Amino acid sequence: MLRHFVHSIFGLLLLAGSASAQQPAYKIESTDSQVVNATITYEIQTKNFAVSRWMIFLPEPPELPSQPKLKVIGNPAGKVVNEKSPLGRKVRFIDISVAKPAPGAKMPMKLEIESTLRARKLVELKPGEKPPVVPALTVREMRYYLSPTPRADFNAKAFQDWLDAKKLRRNKGENPLELAARVLNVLRADYKYHYDPNEDKRASVACKTNRTDCGGMTFVFVAAMRANDIPARALVGRFAKPRKPRSTASDPGFDQPHIRAELFLAEIGWVPVEPAFANAQRRRPVRDFIGNDSGDLLVLHIDTDLVLPFPDKNREVDLLQIGPYYWVTGNGKFDGAVGPNGWEVKTTPLGKK
C-alpha cells in the first residue's frame, strides 16, 4: 500500500497544525467578478448500430470558493450521482431506454450552467487583523490531496528522480508558498507551452519532456506539492469565454479548456496557482501567479481520475472536460461516435463592492 494512504489521523492533524505555524500572515480576499451563462451541447450518434439503452456521464460543476453560486439544468435531466473515487465527486448520469431501436441512433444532450465567478487574491493581513475562520480539510480530503493518483503520480521513480535533479525537496523551515514559487520557476525555465489533447500528461511523463500544456504543467505542480506533503489539487474546466472565430477542435480556443492548480494552507484555505500562465508570462515574477485568480474559469470538476459506475464495473476516466463518457446496449456492430459538441458563453461583469 502506498505510504500516503496510511497516514494516521493524528499524523494528518499534526501535519495541518505544523503547516499552520509556518504560514505567513495572509488571507484570501474574494470579489464577485462576473456571472457566466454557459451552454454545452453534446451529441452521440451511430450509423448502423441500433441503440436500445443509453447510459451517459456528464460533468456536474461543483460549488467552490471560486464559484459559489451555481444553477445547472440538463436536457435530458438525468440525475446527479457520486462517482466512486474517495472524493465522491458529483457527476450527471443519463439513463434512457429506447422504445423502438433502429439503426442510425442519435442522442443530443445539453447542459445550461449559470454561475457567479469570483476573483481571489492572497493578501497580507493588516496589523492586528485576525484571519478569517477557514474550515479544515476533512481527514478523507487531506488523505486524498496528499496521495498519488494516475495523473499526479509522484510515487513513480521518474518523478522522484526529477524532484531530486531539480532540487525540489522542501527545505527545512521553507513555507509552501516559497516551494510553490521554486516549482513554477522550474516549469518556466524548462518547458514550452504546447497543446495536444492526446498527449500523455501524467506528471511522471510530463516532467521528462520540454513541452506540455496547462494540464501537464498543473499535474507536475500538484504532484510536486503532494510529494512534499502539501495538499494540492487541479481545477478542471473551461475559460468563461466563447469559441475563437475560425478555430477548430484541435485549437485550445475552440472549447476553451483550461486546468489550474490550488494548494491548501491551514488558516488560509485553497490558494489558486497558475502554472501555465507563469510559464507564458515570463517577464512577471512567478509569485504573481500564486494567490491570484481573475475569476475567469468555469470549473467542471475538481481533480482528475474519476471512477464512473458503468454497468459492467467501475471504470476510471481522466477528465469530463470536453466530451461525455457513455455506454450503450443494442444490436449490430457498434459504430458510435461523439460529436459535434457546442460551447456558448455569455458573461455579465459585476462591479467591485
Image: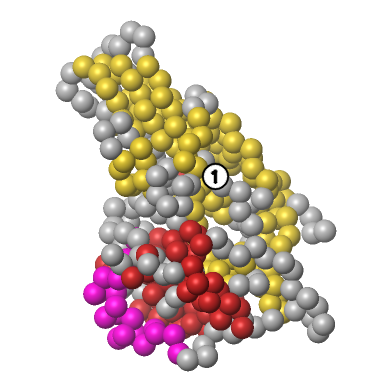
| Residue at 58% over, 72% down | 265
- Is 216 rendered above or below residue 53? below
Residue 54: x and y in percent read: 35, 24
Relative to 156, residue 108 above or below: above
Q: Is residue 171 left or right of residue 131?
A: left
Total numbered circles:
1
Q: Quadrant of residue 58?
A: top left
- The residue pinned by badge 1 equals 61
- Indicate the quadrant containing the N terminus: top left, top right, bottom left or bottom right: bottom left
Q: Is residue 206 left or right of residue 25?
A: left
Instruction: Pinpoint residue 193: horizontal percent, then vertical percent.
Output: 39, 67
Q: Nearer the viewer, residue 110 or 342?
A: 110
Q: Is residue 269 above or below residue 130?
A: above
Residue range in magenta is 151-171
* Residue drawn 61% across the image and 49% down it: 63
Whether residue 166 is in magenta: the answer is yes
Residue shown at the point (37%, 65%) measured from the top left: 5
* Residue 84 is inside the magenta segment: no
Badge 1 amino acid? Pro
Q: Nearer the viewer, residue 140 or 220?
A: 140
Local secondary structure at mark 1: loop
Tell me residue 184's x, y (percent): 46, 77
Tell which of 67 and 349 is nearer to you. Answer: 67
Q: Is residue 259 visible?
A: no
Q: Residues within 10 Å of mark 1 (few under 14, many from 20)?
A: many
Residue 219 x/y as whole percent: 39, 65
